[in-house]
Image (tube, helix red, strand yellow):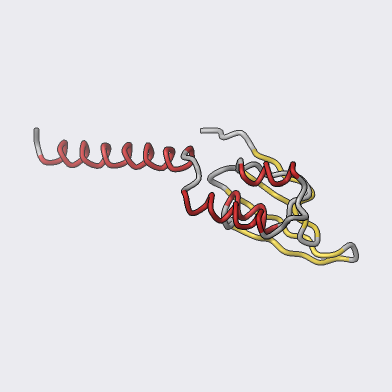
Amino acid sequence: MNIKKKLCLLVLVMMLSGCATFEKLLSEEPSNYEQHMREMYIDSHPELSDEIKNKILNGKIAIGMTRTEVELILGKPNHINRSDNEEGSREVWTYPVENYVLIFYDDILKDWQRFDKRY
C-alpha cells in the first residue's frame, strides 16, 4: 500500500472511532459524580415533589424545573439567549448535540423540545 492510501485509511479509522466514542459518551449512564450531585441536590431540597425528585434522579427534564435542576441533568447549555420584557426574564437554552431547545421564564422551565436528528 502506498503512503497516501495508508494515510487515508488511518484518518478514516480515527474519524470512525471518534464518532463511536462520542456516541457512546452520549448514551452512557451518569457518572458517579453526576449521580452524587443529583442526590445531594435532592437531599438539600426537601420541598421538591416526588415526581421532580424521580425525574432528577432518572435524568429526565420536566416543565416546572429550575435552571439548576435542568443543568444537573443536561449540563451547561452550548448557548443561552437572554431577553427581558414586561412579563419578566426569558432565556432560551440550546444543546445542539442533543438537539434540545429549552425556554425558561424567570428561572422556571416553561417549554422544551427535542428535534429529530437528521443526517
Pick the front one: 66 or 92: 66
| Residue drawn at x 27%, y 37% as measured from the top left | 12
Relative side of 48 to 88, left or right:
left
| x and y, in percent, of residue 51 in the image | 74, 41
Q: Quadrant of the N terminus?
A: top left
Give the answer, above or below, for where 117 lies relative to 45.
above
Give the answer, above or below, for where 19 lies relative to 48.
above
Pick the front one: 3 or 79: 79
Relative side of 11 to 61, left or right:
left
| Residue drawn at x 47%, y 49% as measured from the top left | 32
Pick the front one: 49 or 26: 49
Relative side of 94 to 49, left or right:
left
| x and y, in percent, of residue 99 in the image | 60, 42
| Residue drawn at x 15%, y 40% as measured from the top left | 4
Residue that sits furthest to the left in the current view: 1
| x and y, in percent, of residue 110 in the image | 79, 49
Pick the front one: 118 or 108: 108
| Residue drawn at x 21%, y 36% as measured from the top left | 9
| x and y, in percent, of residue 54 in the image | 67, 42
Q: How many marks?
A: 0
